[in-house]
Every structure is written in C-alpha cells, then in structure tokens.
Amino acid sequence: MSLNQIIVEFLMERGAIKVGFANKETLAGGPPSIDLDYRLEGAKSAISFALPMNRDHIRLFLSKKDRSPHENDNIETNLRCKDLSWELAAMLKEEGHLSKGCAANQKYRQDTEDWMLYLHPDLSHRYMAVRSGVGSFGWSGNVGIKDFGTAIMLGTAVTTAELEPTDPEPEEEQFCDQCKMCVSACATDMFDRNKEDSITLGGKEFKYSYRNEIMRCNLCCGGITGLSSSGKWSTWSPGRYDLPWEQEKLVEVAINASQAYAKRPTIPGGYINVVNNERTYMTCGNCQIVCWGNKKETAENVKILHSSGCVIQEPDGEIRVYPGEEAAEKFGRLPSEHQKLYC
Ligand code: SF4
Ligand code: SF4
C-alpha cells in the first residue's frame, strides 16, 4: 500500500468524504497562502480533505427557528477538521515524516498592519482542495462536492513526505451549475453576480466570482451587520448598516461599527473571536450553507432564508425575529442610544 493510500484510508475511516494531495509544483504560482513552508519549514506535500455539515441544523439556522444547532455543528466540524489533521500528522510522524495539522478556521497571518481588515489565512484550505481535486470552486468561491454542494468543511495537513499529487476535478464531475442562487443569499453583495475572477495554481486555472469587497463579508459574517439591501430579511446579526461602496467610507463605517458592536449586550452561545478576543456568534456563512449541490434543495434553502425575517436585539440582549417591515418599525421604537449600536 502506498503512503497516499494509507492516508486516504486513515481519513475516510474517520469520516472524510474526499481526500486529495498537492505539492509545491501543483500549487506553484499561487498567492502567499499556498506556501507550505509558512506552516512547516521543509514541507513537500499538503493533504486536503472534507467533512460534511448537518443539513437539518442548516435549515433551522436559515429559517431563524434556531441558531444554536448549526452554530454548534459548525464549531464541532471545524474542530473535527483541525483534530483530524493533527491525528494524521501524528500518524505520519510515526512513519518518520515531520508533519503538522492546521486550524480549520480563525488562524490568520498577522504580518501586515491591516491584517484584521482582510484576515488572510496562514494556509488556504480552498486552494489545497481545488488543486488536489477534493472539490471544485462554486460561483460563491466556496469549495463544494457533487451531491454535497458547499455545505462542507475543509481540513489540511502538511508533511515533509513526498506524496503523489492528485488532479483537480474534471469539469463533468464539478457540482456548480452557475445557478447563482448563492449571490441572492449574501446580504452585503460581497461577490459579483456576473464578473468572474480566477486563480492559477500549478498551471491550472480555477474560476469563481469576482469579490466586490471582502470587507463587506468580514463585517457581515463577523456579526456587525446583517440586514439585506431589500430590508426584507437579515442574517442572524441585528446590525442594520447601509454599507457604502467607496473603500475609504467603508473603512470609516467598519471602524465606527466595530466600536458600537463591542457595546452591544451579550448574546448567549457563540465562540471567542480571535481577532478582537470578544465573544461573538455565528450570524452568516449563508453563501456556503445554502448550496447543497442540488438545484431544488438549494432553491428551497434560499426561499427559507428570504422568508426568515429580520433580527432585532432588545436592550436586555434578547434576540427577536420579525418580518422585515415589522422589524424596521420595532427597531424605530427602540431608545435612540440603543439604536446607535446597530446602524
Ligand atoms: S448556489 Fe451553488 S451551484 Fe449555484 S452558483 Fe452558487 S455555488 Fe454554484
Ligand atoms: S459569508 Fe455571508 S456575508 Fe460573507 S460572502 Fe457569504 S453570504 Fe456574504
């Protein structure tokens, strides 16, 4: 049995749905986050794998019936990806190959002054996954797999072992049919409906949507804002900012909104955000979780999200959900000092 086969078996036995391999040649030409040495000096290969997320919990989250089951599943699956990558690294070390696991999320490069605005990862799980054929890019820029869509989590381990790289998914095996329903699931229009972007890794080009401004996602996914431009639905965030398109103005809003966010009442549950060390809670990820790799199910998910209403936070911290117009009305009746924390 080759080392590649041993690794595939090791990960599949522990719940992975797909496994792939990349090396410095197949990743060549990519951005800094493909640099295996940044994670482990002398690393020669990356092992990429995916775990599925719980769909019933996703539906509860999208409909705003219950946030916690998906939040817990998301955190647990992230932790499972991290743990599994370290379990694999330990197994490879026993085989005589220096290896390291990776955090599945919340691990960012801190070597530029504005790192908190852009949150570049130390290693990109997505690039490892698409180049090694674990999955392919969906229009949203999330990575997905046929029949699973993008409702998956990715994990990566790096090793000094020389593993045989695997090919990207052939077009006929890719899940994304360009339905663009993920675009309608983003409250802040972070990625474009028509404009395309691409990245080249090891001589192969990978395409996905143009990112209009990544900070729009950081503000929304970070829980600071969540009201959609239609005003009819929101994420789980009670924030109601109208985000400007001009970069300078957006940075100004981001700074003021972050300060106001820190003064909001605490919401139960959640996790510690490593960027500001504050307790935060899962409010979005919608572009990722709506796509199930099946047009009918994805359409149902977007329909559920768009009819899920808007979130308001009362001065006592209580989170309430109302239909869009009613939420605007209730929000308008809150004390003005409290309103200032959300818009
Ligand atoms: S919803 Fe899924 S299948 Fe449709 S465009 Fe987005 S990523 Fe592709
Ligand atoms: S995570 Fe939320 S805010 Fe970020 S791009 Fe996806 S849908 Fe938009």
Image (spheres, rainbow, N blue to C red):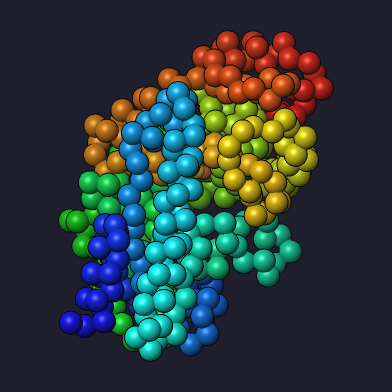
Identified at 36% across, 67% down, the residue is 48
User: Looking at the image, is 60 positioned above or below residue 250?
Assistant: above
Residue 208 appearing in the image? no
Locate residue 126: give its quadrant.
Answer: bottom left
User: Looking at the image, is 106 positioned above or below residue 279?
Assistant: below
Locate residue 26: give its quadrant.
Answer: bottom left
> In the displayed structure, does residue 279 sit left or right of residue 96?
right
Residue 267 in picture, x, y percent from top left: 64, 32
Identified at 30% across, 66% down, the residue is 11
Identified at 33% across, 33% down, the residue is 56
Identified at 70% across, 51% down, the residue is 277
Quarter of the image that includes the C terminus? top right
Identify the residue at the far front of this view. 94
> In the displayed structure, does residue 171 sit left or right of residue 142?
left
Residue 32 appearing in the image? yes
Residue 249 in picture, x, y percent from top left: 73, 42
> In the displayed structure, does residue 259 sit left or right of residue 142?
right
Residue 224 in picture, x, y percent from top left: 65, 37
Locate residue 314: give its quadrant.
Answer: top right
Residue 69 in picture, x, y percent from top left: 44, 35
Q: Which of 320 and 91 is in front in this view?
A: 91
Identify the residue at the far right of this view. 337
Q: Which of 202 and 82 is in front in this view?
A: 82
User: Looking at the image, is 60 positioned above or below residue 159?
Assistant: above
Quarter of the image that includes the N terminus? bottom left
Picture mark count: 0
